Image (cartoon, rainbow, N blue to C red):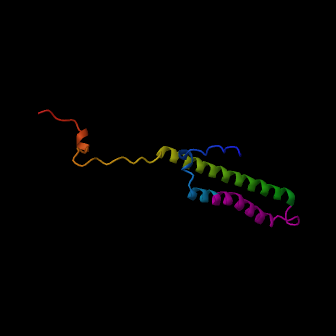
Amino acid sequence: MSPALPPLPSEPFTAWFTARLRRRLAWALAACLALPWAGSEFAKQFVQPGLHNDAARAALLIDYIAIGTALFGLSMVLTWLVGAWVTAVMKGPTHLGDAFPPGSHRPSPRDDEPQQRR
């Protein structure tokens, strides 16, 4: 017999992580990692030993800028995910109530107004 698998997390904790959000997360992570790398590789083409006084140091600076940009982008993606989670938690699960039975008194906003004495 194989050991029992641990129970899956309950639905309220995972319902906010929809397929649409997962797709957007994948695109955001790809952009946060690929764009700074591609930009730094493009910028390093113009740093050559004959054209720059210290080409190795300039290339290293470009790498540091790319790493910082990627980390900043990843922190923004994390902030976005925390915001999506907080929004889902604040909205809560959907509760569908029963309709009023026919012939019953349906409350109206006027019921909340104070009654005047005659």
Q: Point out residue 91 in the picture as x, y percentages from the top left corner.
A: 47, 46
- Magenta segment, which residues? 26-52
Residue at x 58% of width, y 47% of height: 82
Name of the residue lying farthest toward the right: 50
Name of the residue lying farthest toward the front: 1
Q: In which quarter of the image is the N terminus?
A: top right
Q: Say which of 117 and 21 sits in front.
A: 21
Quadrant for residue 47, please give it: bottom right
Q: Point out residue 22 in the picture as x, y percentages from the top left corner.
A: 60, 56
Q: Quadrant of the C terminus?
A: top left
Q: Say which of 29 and 13 sits in front.
A: 13
Residue at x 71% of width, y 58% of height: 33
Left/right placement of residue 75 relative to residue 102 reads right
Left/right placement of residue 44 relative to residue 33 reads right
Q: Say which of 23 and 68 sits in front.
A: 23
- Tell me if residue 15 comes above or below residue 118 in the rendering: below
Q: Point out residue 81 in the picture as x, y percentages from the top left corner.
A: 59, 50
Residue at x 36% of width, y 46% of height: 97
Name of the residue lying farthest toward the top: 117
- Tell me if residue 51 comes above or below residue 83 in the rendering: below
Quadrant for residue 49, please give it: bottom right
Q: Does any portion of residue 84 appear in the rendered image?
A: yes
Residue at x 47% of width, y 46% of height: 93
Q: Is residue 74 magenta?
A: no
